[in-house]
Amino acid sequence: MTATARSTIGVALLALVCLSAPAQVLGQSLDIKGVRIGMTEAEVNERIGNAREFTIGGVTSKNPDRPVGLKYHEGKLDYLAFYFDAKDFSRVQEAVKDKYPSIDCSSSTVTNAMGAKFEQVTCLIADSESSLGLRRFSLDIRTSSIILTSKRLFDEMSKRRAETKKDI
């Protein structure tokens, strides 16, 4: 799967899970390792440094060639995605919960084509400018993700989803 397809799927997944009301952060902006929505590319690069060494909770990306997916809108960060091995989900979840104790996590059951059942965990939190979503299974049952997205992008994806639902 191409990096563009992966990031597009990531935005779509985040839009789907964010339709439920995430926990709200009061008095602080959401960030991943100091990277916040609205930063310039230079500011993001300064915070991330060598992206190949970027980790969350000591966990490395599943994609060593492009460990952090970034999208910008009008020169400002609009989206950050980090995909990692699902076996490391609990380590990343623990790091996120330590930083954002009010994050709301819920569980559901997902079933693959062979009928095997797995526990899906989705955690969500939002501030006035962004949403942070953590999912145990994102692209497949071996891939987890943490995605930080702007309210602007979330609203755009929600609008597209609503329009698509009407197209039948």
Image (spheres, grey):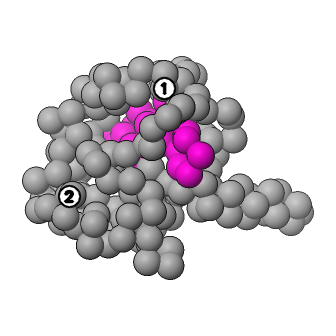
Question: Could you say which disc has been placed on residue 133 in the image?
Answer: none
Task: Tell me which residue sits at (58%, 28%) in the image.
Answer: 23
Quadrant housing residue 154: bottom right
Q: Within 10 angstroms of label 2, few (less than 14), some, or many (20 or more) residues?
A: some
Q: Report the magenta residues as a range.
A: 122-147
- Location of the C terminus by quadrant is bottom right
- Say above or below: 152 vs 4: above
Total labels: the figure holds 2
Task: Tell me which residue sits at (31%, 22%) in the image.
Answer: 98
Q: Secondary structure beneath disc 1?
A: loop
**In the image, residue 137 lies in the stretch drawn in magenta:** yes
Q: Secondary structure beneath disc 2?
A: helix
Q: Nearer the viewer, residue 84 or 19?
A: 19
Q: Within 10 angstroms of label 1, few (less than 14), some, or many (20 or more) residues?
A: many
Residue 33: image x %, image y %?
26, 45
Residue positioned most to the front:
27
Residue 75: image x %, image y %?
43, 77
Q: Type of residue at label 2? A: Ile
In the picture of the structure, the residue carrying the numbered disc 2 is 48
- Say above or below: 162 vs 147: below
**In the image, residue 28 lies in the stretch drawn in magenta:** no
Q: Nearer the viewer, residue 51 or 31?
A: 31
In the picture of the structure, the residue carrying the numbered disc 1 is 103
Task: Tell me which residue sits at (14%, 61%) in the image.
Answer: 49
Quadrant housing residue 159: bottom right
Residue positioned most to the bottom:
74
Q: Earlier in the sequence, mark 2 or mark 1?
A: 2
